[in-house]
Each structure stands twice: as C-alpha cells, then as structure tokens.
Image (tube, grey):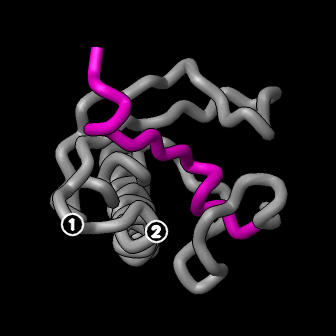
Amino acid sequence: MEDRNKTWIIYPEYFDSRLSIRLGRKVSLKFSIENPTLEELIEAARRARLKIARIERDKHHPSNWIERKGRIIVLRPNNKPKRVILMEIGKNIRIVRKKNIERRKIEQKRRKKRKDVDKYLERILKK
C-alpha cells in the first residue's frame, strides 16, 4: 500500500463543470469539462506526466456516493502543490475531450463511407 504522504487521490468530480465547488469540483470552470470519465482523467494525467500508482474503478467521491465513477491515485511530484497539478490535468482533460470528439467524427465519416460503398456494391450486384 502506498504511503499517504507520497500519493494523491484524484476523482473525475474534481473536473466536472456541472458540479459546484461545494459538491466536489476542485478547479475553476476554465479547467473543467462536463461529466468527465475516468478514461479521460487517466489520459489527462498521463499527458501531464504524472505517475499513476493505481486506478480504482469501483470507488466513489464522498459527496457523490451514488455514482461510482472511480478514481486514480498518483505519486506526488516534488515541489508542486496539488492545486497546480489539478490545473495541469484540467488543461489536458480539455485537450483529451477535444481529441475524442474529433476521433468520433472521423469514425462516423468512415462508417458513412462504408455504408455508401456497401449500397453501391449492392446495386451493382443486383444488376
């Protein structure tokens, strides 16, 4: 088990723009997105060059005990406060969300092209 003084626990709720600070958001709206997933949080932490000690998918935030969104445990970087690290993750989580949206758009275009090709082949084969 990790020493509590050497790790930080980070929840997706810290970056959820739908939540107020009272309900668990830790960063400003500038660094938050709507309904972040654990996968987005993991990717953002990796982009911020944090070492992830453990990923716990079945855990929940204390103020949001109904939803089990999970959490990550990262090793503390030297000489950086948690607030600065959360802002770095927040910047990266926005980038990760944009890339995921672009990736989905590309996949939808590919699917549409495949459907068009399949329809064309069906028409040709019927003749």
Which residue is depicted at the point 44% across and 24% down?
Answer: 56
Residue 88 is marked as none
Q: Are marks 2 and 1 in contact (CB under 8 Å)?
A: no
Q: Please indicate whether residue 12 sits to the left or right of residue 8 in the image.
A: right
Which residue is depicted at the point 66% across and 56% down?
Answer: 35
State yes or no: residue 111 in magenta: no
Q: In terms of image quadrants, where is residue 90?
A: bottom left
Q: Please indicate whether residue 22 sits to the left or right of residue 61 in the image.
A: right
Q: Residues within 10 Å of mark 1 (few under 14, many from 20)?
A: few
Compare residues 120 and 112 and report the one nearer the observer. Answer: 112
Query: What x and y, as percent, mark residue 67?
Result: 74, 31
- Is 72 above or below relative to 22? above
- Is 75 above or below relative to 26? above
From the image, which quarter does the N terminus lie in?
A: top left
Query: What x and y, as percent, mark residue 105?
Result: 43, 69
Give the labeled residue for mark 2: 83
Report whether residue 100 is seen.
no
Q: Please indicate whether residue 27 sits to the left or right of residue 116 in the image.
A: right
Report whether residue 83 is seen.
yes
Compare residues 29 and 127 and report the one nearer the observer. Answer: 29
Compare residues 99 and 117 and report the one nearer the observer. Answer: 99
State yes or no: residue 16 in magenta: yes
Q: Which amino acid lies under the numbered mark 2 shown in the image of this protein?
A: Arg
Which residue is depicted at the point 83% across and 59% down?
Answer: 22
Q: Which residues are magenta?
A: 1-18
Q: Which amino acid lies under the numbered mark 1 shown in the image of this protein?
A: Asn
Compare residues 120 and 99 and report the one nearer the observer. Answer: 99
Q: Residues within 10 Å of mark 2 (few under 14, many from 20)?
A: few
Give the labeled residue for mark 1: 79
